[in-house]
Image (cartoon, helix red, strand yellow):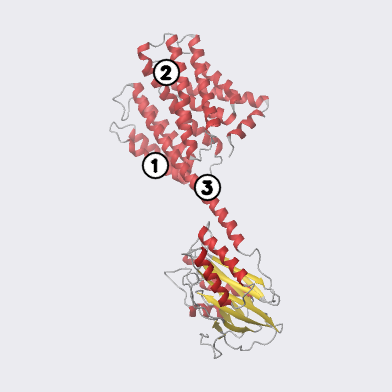
Amino acid sequence: MPSVAAAHGSGAGDSRPVYLLKIAAVAAAYYGAAQLGLDLAFTTESVTAIWAPTGIALAAVVLWGYRVLPGVVLGAFLANLWTDVPLYTVFGITVGNTLEALVGAFLLQRVAAFRPSLERVRDVVALAVLGGVVSTTVSATIGVASLLAGDVIDSGDLASVWRTWWLGDMGGDLVVAPALLVAATHWPYDRAPGRRVEAVGLGLLIGGATALVFTNEVSITFLIFPPLIIAALRFWQPGAVAGCLLVACIAVPLTANEQGPFIDNSPDERLLLAQALIGVASLTMLVLAAVITERSRVEQTLAHIANTLQESLLPSRVPEIPGIEVAIDYRPAGEGQIVGGDFYDAYKADDGTWTIVVGDVLGKGPTAAATTALARYTLRAAAVHERRPSRILLELNAAIQRQTPGQSCTVAYSRLELRDGDRAKVVLASGGHPPPLVLRAYGGVELAGSPGMVIGVEPDPVLEDDTFDLAPGDALVFYTDGLTDAHAPSHVVSLQELAIALRDCAGRDASEIARGLTRAVVDSDAGEPRDDILLFVLRIPPTREPRATAPVRRERDSSPARNPVW
């Protein structure tokens, strides 16, 4: 969106024909709007309760710079030249109208750092206060003084004429100026969630409600607000200004023709009341639209930060382990999701073994990100002087309780040692994490280890190391509970269902296992998964006919494992 400074800079670089065309356009628009406004002048022919040229002049100077002020001068002079007032009064009114636009644009630009897109609440407030309230006093004061000097009005009418002039100009700044500013800065009007069919329907609804309100002597003006609110919610700034302009185009002629809820007042008074209603509606809708766009901007910023942070907390690429197929399938829950809690890590230790970590931190957002960073750092640091996975997890437990009390995580930590070129020994400890599954080459599925206790909850959790071998064709599958709880609570995938789905993937490579398991468990017809899903698959490529491998056993217990086998 162009800023004020950018708009001024582009105006300064215009060629002479373009510059003259802008001057002519401003003068013509000002003059045409002024003639419509003067047709609604009742008490004094030079003072009207509806004065759209104020908004045209302010928007032109804000968007195109001070160099278009001659257009304001020309339009204001021609508009007042045909009224029955002395020439010096015409000059005085012209000076007041020009200074009004100059002061308004100067205050907005220099004091408020105004952005004409009106996407911030502060910009809407600045336009209302500095443009609508402050700058309009300049034109009202100079113009009324000029009328008094020309004997067009009596001193007794000074206060009422000044009020009518001031409020008329204020309406232009609150209704016309926002419409022009938004029209110039929001093209092609496709950022908001609303669609064209909705726009047509809302236009008919707003028009119908306005016609009903301003053809009925009973005060039911509240009826125009619901459709205007919907327009601001669905179409943001363009919807807010278009809706209010539509209300003005219907309400002002009906009020001028002695219809509507303000009929019992004088002509100027009822026009002022109608304009006040439209101005309040415009200001309210613009504030609502600004709140929505500010929130949308914050959400987009958070999403960008979240994506950047998430990428920094996960390895930049899939690790390459010699002689091992590796596949990772990570799926954050939903679009625009803030930082999730699932994480993984894989790296080679100094002794030649490989460390594989899969975890899930409690919650989401900055706190979860901090705990994730702490977990990755602590696990790597502890692995420098400790080999047993259970002891490493105990150090992580102590770090979480010390640095982020109240947080917790589940972790599956394993050491993988390659042997004889085609086999691997795995030592695994799980801290509250779903135990990995071993898919044997012949199609059997085994549970690797036990869940253990969640990390960060108890000061001394019970954790165990389990040792098992992987032979050619075997695969080790780590996963987070998002896989089994993807569509909870309507359906939670049981361990047996997961094992059956994994068994159907026997003989496939690591990538096919990851994709096949996700497709089998996560039902796309049931909607978006409710939690992040992380799959980490390791597989030793087959080199010979598949054969049975000794089941998983615990290091502390040399007896055969009691883990389920499917």
Q: Residue at 28%, 25% (x, y): give it.
A: 264
Q: Nearer the viewer, mark 2 or mark 1?
A: 2
Label located before the other in sequence (1 or 3):
1
Q: Position of residue 392 (x, y in %)?
A: 58, 74
Label located before the other in sequence (2 or 3):
2
Question: CB atoms at circles 1 and 3 under 8 Å apart?
Answer: no
Residue 47 numbered mark, or none: 2
Residue 297 numbered mark, or none: 3
Residue occupied by mark 1: 227
Q: Crowding near pointer 1: few (<14 within 10 Å), some, many (20+)?
A: some
Q: Crowding near pointer 2: few (<14 within 10 Å), some, many (20+)?
A: many
> Dot 2 lies on which element?
loop
Q: Tell whether 28 sits left or right of 285.
A: right
Tell me the amino acid under the disc marked 3.
Arg
Image quadrant in which you'd find residue 221: top left
Q: Tell whether 538 sits left or right of 491.
A: right
Q: Nearer the viewer, residue 193 or 280?
A: 280
Q: Nearer the viewer, mark 1 or mark 3?
A: 3
Q: Name above or below for residue 355 compared with residue 365.
A: below
Q: Residue at 61%, 30% (x, y): give it.
A: 8
Q: Position of residue 188 (x, y in %)?
A: 56, 41
Mark pair 2, 1: CA separation? 33 Å
Mark pair 1, 3: CA separation? 24 Å
Q: Position of residue 213 (x, y in %)?
A: 33, 34
Tell me the amino acid under the disc marked 2.
Val
**In this view, which residue lies farthest toward the bottom?**
559
Q: Nearer the viewer, residue 302 or 511?
A: 302
Image quadrant in which you'd find residue 428: bottom right
> Dot 1 lies on which element?
helix
